[in-house]
Image: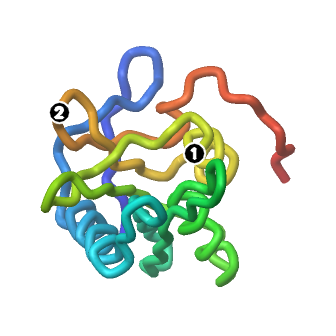
Amino acid sequence: MTGARHPQSARGRHEISYDLDTYDRALIEVARDTLRRNYRKGRHTVAAAVRTSMGHIYTGINIDSGSHGPCAEPIAVGAALTHGEREIEAIVAVSRRGSSYGVLSPCGTCRQLLVDYAPNATVIFRNSEQDAKARARDLLPGPFRSFKEG
């Protein structure tokens, strides 16, 4: 599987796309199914799915404890990394809204994590009441660089 490429703007940044393809919709469905199976009000309310360059999909759910636990996105990224996958191609997170499961935008911490581990990954997110996608590095202007490449 290969990720969709987005046209570049005049400044060299990738633009937000609202044109989700079959692979994007399939990844959303995997995340929704993960949350349907694991939803627990007050504990597990978000699920994420990542697709790697090898075409494998890994999932995760948020872990809530006492104050706040990790989001679903780092759990899914960690599952991929644990299995030796280093090239994350796409990621999406969903939450339950009534009886449906909608796409979420990643929080700032998750955006930083994605810049650190998968800056070129396609992130499917909610933008202006509509699902969209963009590269992870384009969702966080001026990210903190804590890791040296290489």
Residue 7: give x, y in percent of width and height.
31, 34
Please identify the quadrant where the N terminus is shown.
Answer: bottom left
Relative to 35, does residue 133 appear above or below in the rendering? Answer: above
Q: Secondary structure at mark 2?
A: loop
Say which label, 1 or 2, has the lower sequence index: 1
In this rendering, would 6 be left or right of 50? left
Q: Residue furthest top?
A: 11
Name the residue that disc number 1 marks. 110
Name the residue that disc number 2 marks. 129
Residue 19: give x, y in percent of width and height.
17, 45
| Front position in the image: 99 or 28 | 99
Q: Secondary structure at mark 1?
A: helix
Relative to 140, does residue 52 appear above or below in the rendering? Answer: below
- Label 1 amino acid? Cys
| Front position in the image: 43 or 103 | 43
Colour basis:
rainbow
Around disc 2, counting alpha carbons within 10 Å, would you say few (fewer than 14), some (14 to 19), or many (20 or more)?
few
Residue at x 69% of width, y 79% of height: 82
- Label 2 amino acid? Glu
